[in-house]
Image (cartoon, rainbow, N blue to C red):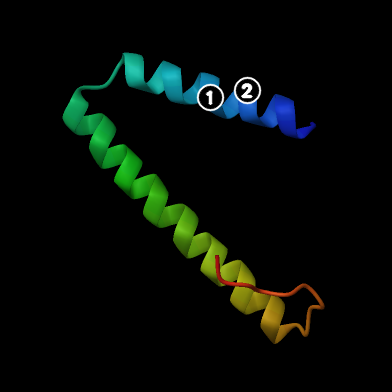
Amino acid sequence: MDAYDWSTGVYATAVAMAKCMTTEELSRTAILLTQLGTTLGTLAALRQMEEGGTGAVTEV
């Protein structure tokens, strides 16, 4: 799956979820998924550092 297909799929999923959620449910879900994504990114970077990966971890 290329980046365009991936992005389209994520967008379609978000729209489908938003259509059947209240504003409060949508906000809570967004917060949860944002925290989940951030935590997963942190864990992936830490794992890469422990494994001696060559990929640079940079702050944006």
For the point 53% across and 24% down, which residue is it? 11
For the point 61% across and 24% down, which residue is it? 9
Where, by quadrant of the figure, is residue 4 drawn?
A: top right
Q: Position of residue 10 (x, y in %)?
A: 56, 29
Secondary structure under badge 2?
helix
For the point 55% across and 62% down, which residue is it? 41
Secondary structure under badge 1?
helix
Q: Is residue 5 above or below residue 58?
A: above
Q: Is residue 17 above or below residue 29?
A: above
10 with respect to 4 (left or right)? left
Asked if labels 1 and 2 touch by Cβ distance under 8 angstroms, the answer is yes
Q: Nearer the viewer, residue 25 or 55?
A: 55
Most extreme residue toward the front, as rendered? 60
For the point 34% across and 40% down, which residue is it? 30
Q: What numbered label is drawn on residue 53?
A: none
Q: Position of residue 43 (x, y in %)?
A: 55, 70
54 with respect to 46 (left or right)? right
45 with respect to 2 (left or right)? left
Q: Mark 1 highlights which residue? A: 11
Q: Position of residue 37 (x, y in %)?
A: 48, 54
Q: Residues within 10 Å of mark 2 (few under 14, many from 20)?
A: few
- Label 2 sits on what residue type? Thr
Q: Nearer the viewer, residue 60 or 25?
A: 60
Q: Mark 2 highlights which residue? A: 8
Q: Residues within 10 Å of mark 1 (few under 14, many from 20)?
A: few
- Label 1 sits on what residue type? Tyr
